[in-house]
Each structure stands twice: as C-alpha cells, then as structure tokens.
Image: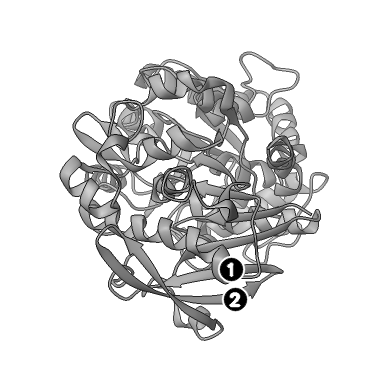
Amino acid sequence: MKKILYAAAECAPFIKTGGLGTVVGSVPEVLIDKGYDVRVVLPLYECIAWEWKEQMTKVLDFPVRLGWRLQPAALYEFRYYGVLHYFIGNDFYFSGDSPYSDIWLDVEKFSFFAKAVLELPAYLDYDPEVIHCHDWHTGLIPVYLRTEYAGNPFYQHIRTVMTIHNLKFQGQTPLDHFKDASGLPDDLFTYDKLEYYGCGNMLKGGLAFADRITTVSDTYAREIMCPEYGEGLDGLLKYREEDVSGIVNGIDARIYDPCTDPNICARYDVHSFHGAKKINKKDLQQRTGMPEEDDIFTIAIISRLTEQKGLELLLPVLDSILEERIQFYVLGGGEERFQEMFLQARERYPEKIFVQFNYNDPMAKKMYAGCDAVLMPSLFEPCGLCQLMAFRYGTVPVVRLTGGLVDTVRPYSQKKGISNGFGFEEYSPEALLHTLNEAVSLFYMKPRAFTGIARRCMQEDYSWERQSEGYIRLYEGL
C-alpha cells in the first residue's frame, strides 16, 4: 500500500477559499477507496470553525527549528470520511480571522509549516513514500527535504510532487527577509533555485526541487511554459518539461447531482432534465424577483469577480447582451469595479439581470439547475470547476478556450456533432459577443440542437473517481 501525505494550506470542509481547498478535500477520500493510505496535513488556523475544532484530538507537542528560531508546534488529528487529517497548531503563526495575511508574514508562516510537515514522520507511526505539495504555501517542503534533511536516512526514500493550482500566486518577498524567514543558506538563492528578480520565491523552490510537477489541466501545463502564461517561471518549467504533467480536476459527483440535490425544486436526470429545467427556471425567477418566463434564455456567471475571469470583456458589450431576450444571473464577490459594472447594469435593465455578491452554495446550485448556460470568458483558467459543475446540471458552458476550458469544452462551432458547449479563442469583447449570440440563436432557432448539447453535458464524467486515475499513475511512476 502506497502512503501519500497531502500538504496544503486549505482543505474542505475545514478551510476553503477556492479550488485548492476543494481538490485537497476530495481526492484523498477517493484514493483511500482505491487502496492507498492517504493523509492530509494543514495548519490549525484560529479561523477554522469551532464545530470542527471540538472534534479534534491533540496528539503531541513538538519543536520546529526555523533558522535561529525554535518554535513550538501542537499536533491535532481528526478522521473525516475515512481520511485522517493532521492539524499543526501555533498561535503565533496561525491566529487571525483569515488563513492569509500580508505576504511578508505568510512567507515565514508557511516556512514554519513546511518544516513542521517534515518533522511529523519522526513523531508518528506513519512513514510517507510521497509528500504531495499544493501551491506556493508548501513550496519549501521539497527544498528542505533535499537540503537540510538530505543527510538523514529516514527521509531519503520520500518523493515529492508539486501541484500548481494557479501560477499567478508564488509567495515572494525580498531576499533578505526571505532568507531570515526560511533559515535557508545563501547558496540556494540563485537564478535556478529560489531567487526570482531580486526576491525569494517559495513556489519556484518547489518547482526546482520536487521530483514531479503537476498542474490542473493538460493545456495549462503547456501554457505555463510560454511567456504569456508563465508568470516569469516559464524558463524553469520548460527546463523541467519532462517532469511536468497536467491532470484535469474533478468534482464530487455526489454533491453535484441533480438527481438528489436537496437545493433544487425539481430533481432530474439526463432523461427528464428538459421538463425539470423549466420548473427550476421558474423557481429561480421567483426567488430572485425576475419575470417568470420558462422559455427565455437564462445564463449565469458563478465566479469570483476578478480580472482573471475575463470580466473586462463584458464591459463594452453588456448592454448589447441585455438588449436581447435574455436573463442574466450573477453570483460571486470580487473586485469593486466589476461589482459596480453589474449593479449599474441592474439599474438600466432591472428585469434582465440579477446580482448577488455573497456567494453561497445553495444559490449556486439553483442557478445551475435553473439556467440554460454559464459564461466563463476567462483571461486564463488553470482548470475551472464551474463548467464541470454545469455539465452535471445540463447547463451549457460558454467559454474562452484557454487552460482547462480547452480540455473540457468541445465548442459547437468546431464540433457540432459532439459539442458540449460554445467557445471562442480571441480575447476580445467582439469574440465573446459573437459566441454568446451563437448560443442564444441556437437556443431559440434550433431548440432540439441546443437540447442535444445539454444532454451531452450531462453525460460527461469528471468525477474524482475517474480523474483520480491520473494521480494514481503519477504515484506509481514515482
């Protein structure tokens, strides 16, 4: 039985701000069902809800040396759906009402976490063969393992995997502070290791020292080797090309299942979705105060409202979109400029657009079940989860073809017989408008063709049961 230790800054349901927490919270359970001994280690943040903390058991206290500092660590554990989760506590580093703070504080915080993760096996009856590191917060685990712990026979069999969930976030601070915070020697701060344009870079360290590197889709794995998407690390990633692979994310098919979803008005499967969609659309309209029309084209944005999500493309064409026979639903908070854009549109078209900036999962599922399409015009998208969730509900994605959206969406304009969505390549308002109009036109003019696309969406399988096979092949290869 292969022993895998997942190390991450987030893990659902304990602490989650995005896709990272979703992935780390889902994959281990599936791998355990397939015979692996997978455990998860994460920080014990003060902001983790008490309902979880009160179920944890304290195991031990142990010291962690971080350069000239000797910091205490407290280890707690809790088994959730068969997965043993370890929580590393330290009141100095993990206090506050958020898992993250200023980057200069976070670099030291996650340097401490990396060292604590590597100390764990010496205190537990658990000897991992692979430590799977997720995003920049864990980037120093492979670095410490191959330098400070290299001479210790206890650690020599351990291999590391570094997964990039979003290359844009790397964990950088000026060199002097980075050296002090991490306790790492000067000879590691060179262009091919931890140095990055006069700063130290935690993710770069992980990419330089890990045995394997993964991203969350095949296309994103290729894109980040190019300057346009490489965020300054394309050279290193290109150098390590043989060790880089992409594994498309999955979703928990039990949670996103219109056959059993308690949040939606009418439950359905691939055979009954057409009538149920109309019922769920009417329910969504009633709940949001929109006009009740079961035959109107409805589209949703369920997303963080940030530049990465391509919302700049909407600004010049939003009025043109809303002048059509369409209802637009927006769910998710983010940058003030984009929130203001949708609020102003709501004032101009009060019966055409609904906005809610405080995301919640029940409303998201009502939108998936009640809308005909979701819009994802992303500037870049490492994988994307919204389109995978939309598939489950027979809700057709309209996307910009980048990253994981290329790997999961087959656009109607290119693959009419097997399409499961609509897509455009050029990052421009005109391309977005043209593709969205194509979807609207097909919905009204060729409803059977649009229904066929929706049926194919529901037949897609991006469950973790299937997608986890990519990780199993990776681990066996190590």
Q: Position of residue 47 (x, y in %)?
A: 37, 73
Q: Is residue 104 at all visible to an observer of this figure?
A: yes
Label 2 vs 1, first from the N-terminus:
2
| Residue topped by disc 2 | 78
Q: Is residue 72 above or below residue 69?
A: below
Q: Residue at x 56, y 27 (%)?
A: 244
Q: Quadrant of residue 63?
A: bottom left
Label 1: which secondary element = strand
What residue is shown at x 59% (from left), y 76% (from top)?
78
Position of residue 94 in the picture relative to residue 180 (left or right): right
Q: Residues within 10 Å of mark 1 (few under 14, many from 20)?
A: some
Q: Position of residue 411 (x, y in %)?
A: 61, 21
Residue 462 appears in view = no
- Identified at 42% across, 15% down, the residue is 426
Q: Nearer the viewer, residue 100 or 370?
A: 100
Quarter-wise, where is residue 359 in the image? bottom left
Quadrant including the N terminus: bottom right
Give the amino acid at mark 1: His
Q: Which residue is mark 1?
A: 85
Picture coordinates of residue 348, whole percent (x, y):
27, 42
Image quadrant where residue 17 sits: bottom left
Quadrant including the C terminus: top right
Residue 226 lies, with reference to residue 460, above or below; the image says above
Q: Is residue 429 above or below residue 198?
A: above
Q: Disc 2 residue type?
A: Phe
Residue that protrudes farthest toward the right in the picture: 271
The residue shown at (32%, 25%) is 232
- Label 2: element kind: strand
How far is mark 2 from mark 1, CA to CA?
Answer: 5 Å
Mark 2 and mark 1 in contact? Answer it, CB < 8 Å. Answer: yes
